Image (cartoon, helix red, strand yellow):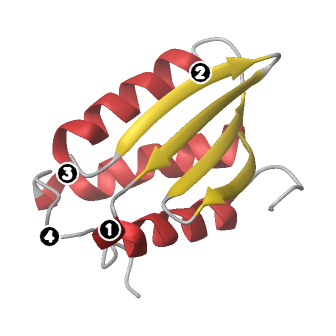
């Protein structure tokens, strides 16, 4: 699968901007992602290490992603020093969620890749 082949046709982000958005997510994953889990088939949980400006960064990315990929539902929660970003999709977009999970796991900075 090529770099952006997993991006669904339903995404309204202009093609020229897609690599930049992917790079933003990749940087966040590489810097802050500690755990990737799949509590349900249609829900992915990304647990990120909190820190200065991280919540704002996560919220901003989730909001912008919702604007171009309305099939994603993002929920952000915090506890201790962890920000959990839950991403849910409908059954049609499960392959997109799986591709996102695979990408996140490949870039996880931490050891727990469950």
Q: Which mark is residue 105?
A: none
Q: Mark 2: few, some, or many residues within 10 Å (few <14, many ≥20)?
A: some
- Secondary structure of the residue carrying tag 2 is helix
Looking at the image, is 85 positioned above or below residue 16?
above
Residue that badge 4 annotates: 9
Q: Earlier in the sequence, mark 1 or mark 2?
A: 2
Q: Earlier in the sequence, mark 2 or mark 3?
A: 3
Looking at the image, is 32 positioned above or below residue 111?
above
Q: Earlier in the sequence, mark 4 or mark 1?
A: 4
Q: Earlier in the sequence, mark 4 or mark 3?
A: 4
Q: Which mark is residue 54?
A: 2
The quadrant where residue 82 appears? top right
Residue that badge 1 annotates: 93
Measure the C-alpha gap from mark 3 to mark 1.
Answer: 21 Å
The residue under the point 14% across, 70% down is: 9
Residue that badge 3 annotates: 17
């Amino acid at each position: 699968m090529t770099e952006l082949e997993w991006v669904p046709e339903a995404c309204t982000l202009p093609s020229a901007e897609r690599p930049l958005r992917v790079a933003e997510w990749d940087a966040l994953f590489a810097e802050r992602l500690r755990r990737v889990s799949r509590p349900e088939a249609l829900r992915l949980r990304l647990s990120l290490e909190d820190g200065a400006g991280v919540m704002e960064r996560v919220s901003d990315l989730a909001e912008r992603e919702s604007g171009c990929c309305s099939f994603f539902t993002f929920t952000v929660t915090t506890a201790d020093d962890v920000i959990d970003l839950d991403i849910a999709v409908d059954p049609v977009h499960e392959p997109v969620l799986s591709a996102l999970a695979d990408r996140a796991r490949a870039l996880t900075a931490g050891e727990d890749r469950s």
